[in-house]
Image (cartoon, rainbow, N blue to C red):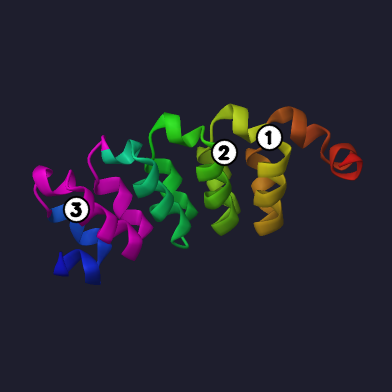
Amino acid sequence: IAAVSNDGEALEYASEELQANYNLVMTAVSNDGKALQFASENLQNNYNIVMAAVSNDWGYALEYASEELQNNPNIVMAAVSNDGYALQYASEELQNNYNIVRTAVSQNRDALQFASEDLRQNWFDVTYRH
């Protein structure tokens, strides 16, 4: 635990058993969201683990979340709040969600490129109607 407390990415060198250990992975992702990529598949589908990873100034951790959690509005909102570019890893459904896209674009206006085609084409109209 000491290693991942100082450097979450040290999880890469842990055994598969340790990469599946909830407490160890939570410590790692709380220290560094990028550590999610080294967590077991089961923990990449754990709401609390993924929320800790994307909330830790590294929304890009959404890339390593399960498809189910890439479609979870709370997880995606936390990710795009930290980094608008995380929108590229959200489900297509959430890339078409006005509130999520608005949050992503307000964090980084270039994130609009990852929004659904419909929202991109109608951004001005949609933004001023809400």
Q: Nearer the viewer, mark 3 or mark 1?
A: 1
Q: Quadrant of residue 62?
A: top left
Disc 3 or 2, which lies upstream in sequence?
3
Decide: few, some or many residues near mark 3? Use Cα within 10 Å; few <14, some 14-19, many ≥20: some
Q: What's the CA distance linking mark 3 and mark 2?
A: 28 Å
What's the residue at 26%, 35% (across, down)?
A: 41
Q: Position of residue 48 (x, y in %)?
A: 37, 47
What's the residue at 37%, 57% (across, down)?
A: 33
Q: Is residue 119 left or right of residue 100?
A: right
Q: Is residue 96 left or right of residue 31?
A: right
Q: Amino acid at mark 2?
A: Pro
Disc 1 or 2, which lies upstream in sequence?
2
**Magenta-colored segment: predominant secondary structure:** helix
Q: Is residue 98 magenta?
A: no
- Judging by the rendered image, the residue that carries numbered circle 3 is 12
Which residues are the magenta region? 14-42
Whether the residues at callouts 1 and 2 have beta carbons within 8 Å, the answer is yes
Whether the residues at callouts 3 and 1 have beta carbons within 8 Å, the answer is no
